[in-house]
Each structure stands twice: as structure tokens, then as C-alpha cells.
Image (cartoon, coloured by chain):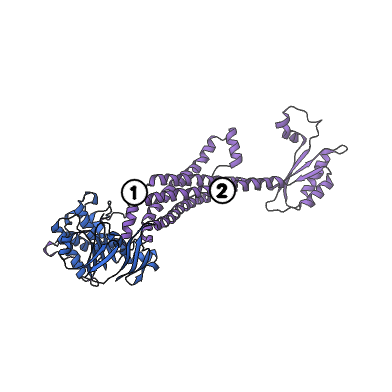
Amino acid sequence: MVRFENVGLRYGLGPEILRDLSFMIPAHSFQFLTGPSGAGKTSLLRLLFLSLRPTRGLVNLFGHDISLLNKDQIADLRKRIGIVLQDFRLLDHMTTYENVALPFRVMGRDESSYRREVIDLLKWVGLGERMDALPPILSGGEKQRAAIARAVISRPQLLLADEPTGSVDPTLGRRLLRLFIELNKSGTAVIIATHDITLMDQYEARRLVLHQGRLHIYE
Amino acid sequence: MNRSGDEQVSLVDLGRERPQLPAMARNMSPIVPRASISGRALVAVVAIMTFLASMTTGTVLLVSASAAEWQSEVSSEITIQVRPSPGRDLDRDSQAAADAMRAQPGILEVRPFSKEESGKLLEPWLGSGLSIDDLPVPRVIVARLQPGTTLDLAGLRARVTQAAPTASVDDHRAWIERMRSMTGATVFAGVGILILVIIATIISVSFATRGAMAANRPIVEVLHFVGAGDSYIANRFLRHFLRLGLEGGLIGGGAAMLMFGFSESIANWFAGTPVGDQFAALLGTFSLRPSGYLALAAQAVLIAAITAWASRRTLFATLDDIE
């Protein structure tokens, strides 16, 4: 599903922050991406989400060499990827329901075709009572759950999550992890970037450890 | 939980948590909020530009119509001037020239001005009460042509000068040429102003679009995250700009049309005054024909379309910079 070969990344003329990354993310797999702060976890996630281009090496996503893709083709590939960012990126003028339903709306689907699914998911992540609330009045944890719900609602083939349990209590963290595991069982490859050892210890999965710009894989 | 299965299958199983009541359809918020685009300033700019463009076009149409009217009036007349000359009888020469004109086919009416009438033509310059017996005042003969007649002017000149050697024939061609030049210059200036107005509109709209895109950059980024292509995003913005352009075009074009609609009444108030007469001489009755109003309406729609086009171009250029 994802193949990196000797990938390097630098910002501008700065030092190379990711070096010689070569790995594969198989379909239906589950992995944690971890490493110290500043190791390049977010940059690697952005490479996987195609919002950054590598400065060298080959990135192959869903069978496509991304260096050969135009903007429209990249947009089409992104529809198969869900992403949860640390700063949530919810749209403040839309309700929680509308934010979560946004991927379906962009696909051009009729609201009646996804309404039930969105409401069910919002209830699952504990936002059933906050469906009509606007993001500015949501707590940090609620925003994070809304962002996760938006990323998983369209059942992407690849889910990328950057510290997805950073703003929630341990109980809700376990519940969210269960959601990711369920999603993975339904066929989605999941990559969770986290510092949280407790979270990683709750589920036996492959670990990708970034250290000094290089990737070490623990199966 | 099977991706390839039924779309209605829920991602999560709520069990007893599942709501028992059917979910109601929702009024979805616009993806790009209307309030996030500073529309008032843009509507004002487009309205002013449309108003200026409409006034220019309307004035050009009025001048062109008046000039065409003058030209048709002037070109349907020929003036013969018989100058006094020692040893010649001016009355007899005038009569001979008038007779030569009458014999010419295509002439509807020939009207020789008498000595008194010719003297009256000079009153504005020489004053009244002056005896013109001692002055060498030429006689004027005005001939009215049948509409659509093409005269052999050289032949006519030859016949008239044969009858009266001091006569000269003027078909006002030089005057008509000057009129044509003036009308052409007016239309040229009008088109120049229109081009400037359109360029100013495009620049204003491009700035407004860039501003709106900058203000909505977070929305654009999120739309990219959820897989929206540039066309999808651009169309969300384009609707707003098309609406703003139409609003501005309607206000500016409507105001100009009202202006021309009332101008006839205003011209009537000033009728008889020196100012009113001067304007009437230049611009005729001030009334725009129905085709003129149609032209103004088409122009307002054109400016709205230019607003949308300029916005679309800027949108795609800006989207290239936002990842």
C-alpha cells in the first residue's frame, strides 16, 4: 500500500531531517510511529499524506509514484486517506456534525445517505450531545474526538493520526484506540504517531521508531 | 464494517445507544461562509465601475445617434451661393442657378433666398437696421434632395456655373466629414474609457479574491485534507463572487438606466434656456432608444461575468500556493 525507498527530506537549505527511510506499510496493518520530540514524526505523516514532497527517494502510494501525480490526482488519493492532526483543524463556522460529515459532502453525497452514519459515530466518540455545537465552544478533548470522527467517517484505506489521544483522559483514550482497532479490522491500515507508552502497551502492534532522522522498525 | 459492503452499514455498532428516532434532515452551513468575504466593498467597486461604463456607453450612443441625425439632415441639402460680380445681374444669376437646379432630377425643392432674407442671415453679425444695399452680399439657394438620391455633383456644378458663373455649389461634404471624425473620436474615447473601467474592475476583483482566499486559508487547507480538488474549492468561492458581481452590476447598471430615463425629463425642464439649447444641439432629445437600454443591461451582465472570470483566475492561481 505504501512504499518508501531511500526517502530524504529537508526544509529549504536546512539539514536533512529524515534520512534514507525505506519501509512498507502493508494493507490492513496497524503500527505506532514513535520517537522523541523533533524526530520528524509529523513530517513523516505529512509525507504520507502527500502534503510534503520528499527531497529525494521514491514514495509509492496505492501503487502510484507520487512524483508523477498532478494536483487533481493527489486530491483523489487523499480521499483514500484520513488524517488527524494535533491542532484538529476543525472549521469554526460549522457544527460538529457538519465538520464530521465534510468528507462525504466533498464527495458530493446526499446528506440523507450519510446522516445516520455520522450521528452514530458522533455518539460512539461521546459527542452525541454536542452535534450542533460549534468548535469554539468545544473542549480540547471534544475537538480531538470530532477531528478523529472526521478522519474515520469515510472509512479511509489509510488512517494517519498525530497524537490522537493527547487531549483526552485514559478511559476515552482506550475507547478511541478501540475505534482505531475496529477500523483496522475492517481493512484500514492505521499509523498512530504518539509519545504515549501506555497507549502503545495496550495493543500489540508494529512499532516504527524515528531517531535522529532514521527509522527503526520493531515488528 | 465492510468497506465494500452497503454504504448504510454503520462504522460503529451503538447497540442500545442507537437513537430510536429518525434523524432529521439538516440545513447545512455553506462551506465558505458568506460573511468571510468582504463583499460590500467589492459590490460598491463593481457598482461604480458598471455605472461609469454605462454612462460612457449611453453618452456614446446618444452622441452617435445625434450625429447620425445631423448628418442625414445636412446631407439631404445642397447650398448654392451666388456671389455678386461687377457687370453681372445678381437677381438674374440667382434665378438662372435656381432654374438649373430645378431641372436636375432628384431635387425635391429649390428655395432661393431673397435679398432681404439673405440680409437677415447676416443680422447676428452685423446687427439689424443696417442697409445692405451697398454691401456685396451673396445670394443663397437651398435645394432639398429626395432621400436616397445620389447626385452627380460634378455635372451639377458644371450646369450651375454655366448658368451663373459666380455660383458655387456646396454639398456640405467637408462638414459631414468633420462630423464623422468627431463621432469617431467620441466612440474611440468611449471604448478607451470602457477598457480602463474593465481593467480597473479586474484588478479590484483580483485583490478582493486574494483577500478572501487569505482570510479563508484555514478552510482551504481543511478542504484539501478531506480530499477536495481545486475545482471543488474554487467553485465554493466562485458562487460568492458571481453573486457579488451581479449585485454590483445590477446596482450600477440600474442607476445609469434611471439616470438616462430621467435625463429626458431634466432636459425638458431646461428647454428654452441657453444651456438647455446647447445640450439639445449636442445630444438631441437625451432619450436613449430601447436598444440602448438593452446594451446597458448586457454591459452590466458582462461586468458581472468579468468579475466571476477574474475571481476564478485568481482563485486557481492562489490555490496553487496553498497546500
Amino acid carrying mark 2 in the image: Gly
A91 displayed left or right of B58: left
Query: Chain A rendered in what hue?
Result: blue
Q: Residue furthest left?
A: B16
| Image position, residue A46 (x, y; %) | 31, 61
| Chain displayed in purple | B
| Image position, residue B212 (x, y; %) | 38, 50
Q: Which residue is mark 1?
A: B36
Amino acid carrying mark 1 in the image: Ser
- Tell which subunit mark 1 falls on: B
Task: Report the quarter where the N terminus of chain A lies.
Answer: bottom left
Q: Nearer the viewer, residue A25 or B257?
A: A25
Task: Report the quarter where the C terminus of chain A lies.
Answer: bottom left
| Image position, residue B234 (x, y; %) | 38, 57
Determine if residue B65 is in view: no
Secondary element under disc 2, as helix, strand or loop, is helix
